[in-house]
Image: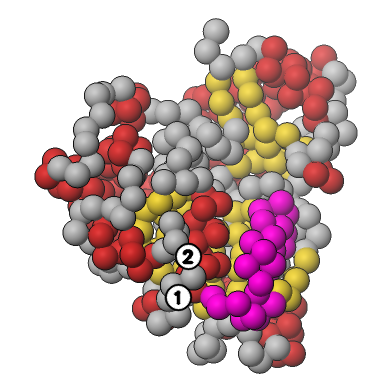
Amino acid sequence: MEERLFTPGPVRLPERVKNVLGKQIIHHRTEEFRREFLEVRELFKRLLHNPSDNFVFFSSSGTGAMESAVLNFFEEGDKVIVINCGKFGERWKQLAYHWKLEVIEYDVEWGKSFDPDVLAGIIKKNEDVKGVLYQISESSTGAYNDPYLIKEVIEYRDIITVADGITALGVYNIDPIKQGIDVLVGGSQKAFMLPPGLSMIWFSEKAERRLTNRAFYFNIKNELDKQKEGQTAFTPAISLILAFKESLSMLLAEGMNEVEKNYRNISERLKEAFTRSNMRIFPEKPAISMTVVFTEKADEIRKELLSRGIRVAGGQDKLKGKIFRISHMGVDSYEIAGLLYHLDSILYSMGIIKERGILQKTFGGG
């Protein structure tokens, strides 16, 4: 039985993507690859509603692009604010400390989102801050941080915003210029519906003026010169780039407004279903890329689902055994309804819900 993935990366691969990945590989130093790569770049520009060439792809996980952001836009000793709302906020903090930035930690209780007034107060006390690093969708807790609210706080200041959009790109209709994002990081294995191994980093003109030469492999200047011509400085993730063309084409054919609308619909219906079942949605302001439910029986529930060939994610660190996470990425409403059919049975048998079928009925609008 093929395992069904409802995890926030990797996600299930669409048939169109699998068909590309199953083809014989081509060589990257060829005209064929150059044409394909430039097409992918044009599609990525359309995704972000921006004609700028200021972005590169790396053969790495999303963490590689996060490290590139720290190395390429900040010098040793630069002061940055890290909004730490969970496991991946901690990763920003680890990267910033590792590369010897001066870190101001804005720690937020896990499950909550940042407070603009608190951020404004931190900046007021630290006028020499060079950057704010944060997650749009903190996938360890399911919390959402609104880029517009950060833009309102730092607008007209000489501060660049660095957003981890790894579980936001391909979910939200992101327009980095309108939302005040100066550096945007993404990864392939989330809503782009690809295997892990391809990351991307987009940057504004404001951030471009900060570019350094501190990195070697993750050097944006070196890669940008090559990639604008349809090549890469080092061996690219050839198959992933070719498959990226398919996933971007799928998203753009549907339209990102419609894509976001569909994700929001799934998110709101799941929230209603669990709330009506007297189960607690963990994040205060949920991201629409996943639903995170708090329960002391989280691991038991996950184990029962896995016995039925369904994998959902659990909690990390302090949330281990206390939450389960259902990804909306790479699945549709019918597949979510199928998951809820099994969850209804499991939760009823465990005595967590009192009415058999309530989750599926509520999600279906009954």
> Which residue is depicted at the point 37% across and 53% down?
57
Name the residue tied to disc 2.
215
Q: Is residue 161 visible?
A: yes
Horizontal and vertical percent for residue 329?
51, 38
15 over 86 or under it: above or below: above
Q: How crowded is the residue under tag 2: few (<14 C-alpha within 10 Å), some, or many (20+)?
A: some
Q: Are marks 1 and 2 in contact (CB under 8 Å)?
A: yes
96 left or right of 50? right
What's the amino acid at mark 1? Thr
Quadrant (top left/top right/bottom left/bottom right) for the C terminus: top right
Mark pair 1, 2: CA separation: 8 Å
Horizontal and vertical percent for residue 154?
57, 83
Name the residue tied to disc 1.
212
Q: Specify start and end residues of the magenta stretch as a single range.
A: 74-102
Q: Nearer the viewer, residue 284 or 99?
A: 99
284 left or right of 16? right
> Which residue is depicted at the point 51% across and 32% down?
11
Query: Quick check: is 87 in the magenta stretch?
Result: yes
- Give the quadrant of residue 8: top right
As drawn, the label of residue 143 is none
**Furthest-top residue in view?**
1
- SS assignment at label 1: loop
- Give the quadrant of residue 48: bottom left
